[in-house]
Image (cartoon, grey):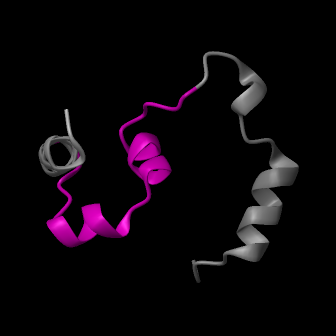
């Protein structure tokens, strides 16, 4: 499968499963797409977010809530 065919297929999946519009798809990185589709989840707690990391993320990226 070439890049164009793979991109069309991935865009269809993003639209159907995530409700993404074309601009959303093209603005996302491959890692963001994998994460949004749940394809990078780990079975163990090694990838889990702990409270310290969450607090740091919340401080670095406040959302005003």
Residue furthest to the right in view is: 52
Does 17 sit above or below residue 42? Answer: below
Quadrant including the C terminus: bottom right
- Please tell me which residue is depicted at 69% across the width and 17% down the height of the picture: 44
On screen, 38 above or below 3? Answer: above
Say whether residue 30 is left or right of residue 54: left
Q: Main secondary structure of the magenta part?
A: helix
- Residue furthest front in the image: 2
Q: Is residue 64 magenta?
A: no
Where is residue 11? Give x, y as percent: 18, 51
User: Where is residue 61 shown, x and y percent of the image?
Assistant: 67, 75
Identify the residue at horizontal 38%, vertical 48% (top origin): 33
- The residues colored magenta run 17-41
Question: Which quadrant of the figure contains the N terminus?
Answer: top left
Please give the name of the residue rendered at 78% of the width and 73% of the height, measured from the top-left corner. Answer: 59
Residue 28 included in the magenta stretch of the image? yes
| x, y percent for residue 51 | 82, 47
């Amino acid at each position: 499968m070439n890049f164009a065919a793979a991109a069309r297929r991935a865009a269809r999946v993003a639209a159907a499963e995530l409700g993404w519009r074309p601009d959303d798809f093209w603005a996302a990185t491959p890692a963001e797409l994998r994460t949004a589709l749940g394809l990078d989840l780990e079975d163990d707690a090694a990838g889990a977010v702990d409270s310290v990391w969450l607090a740091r993320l919340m401080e670095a990226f406040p959302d005003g809530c």
